[in-house]
Image (tube, grey):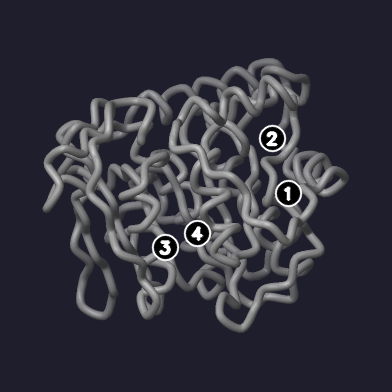
Amino acid sequence: MAAAGIAAVSHAPAAATPRPLPVVYDFTAGIGAELSHPGASLPGTNDFGCRPSRSHPRPVILVHGTGGGRQTNWATLAPVLHNAGYCVFALTYGSLSTVWPASALGGLGPKVDSAWQVKAFADHVMAATDARQVDIVGHSQGTEIPTYWMKYLGGRDKVAHYVSLAPYWRQDPDSDDSRGDAIDTFRRALGIGRPSRPACPECVAPPADTSFNQAVRQPTPYLPGVTYTNIVTRDDEIVTPYSNGILDGPPGTDVRNVVVQDGCPIDRSDHASITSNRRSAALVLGALDPTHAPPVPCVAVPPFTGA
């Protein structure tokens, strides 16, 4: 499944453009992009001929949330990052079908399978761009799937900056976990094996008798040598309380927690629109390149759409 997903992206890369791409600060714009161009990639993303610059030497991989996809989740941040000079890549992981429109709905399968897909995609991006590391920007479920790759599937030294939008590090296992477990059980009942996985000498087994949730979070989701930024919103209606996304790191880790309403109470970003507003975009840019962090604006943001 991972290889098929990579092939689908690789065969139709978004063409690079020397001109800045338009940026729409509206979460629903990604849905419109998917409906207009089924199964495609957003402009400015998945150009496997892109070579990182000296100022931005690492590709950025966007990892969507539950039900999202490489187009639907990133209509705002993809062009923002492209315009800032990054090589930007995005995948759809965890879809239950290769046939559209189900193929556009990601984050629905067993999470370990999804982590293997992220591993395969990241390895492909690094090989294509000659990069030794990537930066990760994840949203919701997309904040924990890459963590599993990093802790257990050989990604430990392959990430420099890890930006999490609406994470839930301290929340109990949710419906995502139980749904993935149910799918795995159903497959086994039908005699369907798990997707094939390549040899992985760099992989390590998670602790015995732990769930995906526990494997990601215990004893900590953070690894030394990675710069982490958690960006959360008080108006998150999915991660409740929103403070479940705020988690300090142990000694030896580099973790920053940001609440978008701190200093800007008129920003009413919720779980979706935290990915699609000017304030979050500036915070992401600053997290990826603190030396050249842009000013962080304060504008009124309605729930869901963004601004």
Give the number of the mark in front: 2 or 3: 3
- Distance, label 1 to label 4, CA atoms, is 23 Å
Residue contact between numbered discs 2 and 1, judged by CB atoms under 8 Å? yes
Residue marked by disc 2? 194
Disc on the earlier residue, 3 or 4? 4
- Please rate how many residues cluster around mark 2, counting C-alpha atoms within 10 Å: few if below 14, some from 14 to 19, many from 20: few
Q: Is any atom of residue 93 visible in this view?
A: no
**Looking at the image, which residue is at 42% across and 30% down?**
177
Residue marked by disc 3? 285
Quadrant (top left, top right, bottom left, bottom right) of the N terminus: top right
- Please rate how many residues cluster around mark 3, counting C-alpha atoms within 10 Å: few if below 14, some from 14 to 19, many from 20: many
Residue contact between numbered discs 2 and 4, judged by CB atoms under 8 Å? no
Judged from the image, the secondary structure of the residue bearing numbered disc 1 is loop
**Looking at the image, which residue is at 38% across and 23% down?**
175
Callout 3, which amino acid?
Answer: Leu
Disc on the earlier residue, 2 or 3? 2
Marking on residue 275: none
Disc on the earlier residue, 1 or 4? 4
Callout 2, which amino acid?
Answer: Arg
User: Does 157 sit left or right of 276 as displayed?
Assistant: right
Residue marked by disc 1? 197
Give the number of the mark in front: 3 or 4: 3
- Please rate how many residues cluster around mark 1, counting C-alpha atoms within 10 Å: few if below 14, some from 14 to 19, many from 20: few
List x then y, in percent, for residue 163: 39, 58
- Distance, label 2 to label 3, CA atoms, is 38 Å
Judged from the image, the secondary structure of the residue bearing numbered disc 3 is helix
Kindly indicate the quadrant of the structure image that contains residue 17. bottom right
Disc on the earlier residue, 1 or 3? 1
**Looking at the image, which residue is at 68% across and 50% down?**
45
Marking on residue 136: 4
Q: Is any atom of residue 272 visible in this view?
A: yes
Callout 4, which amino acid?
Answer: Ile
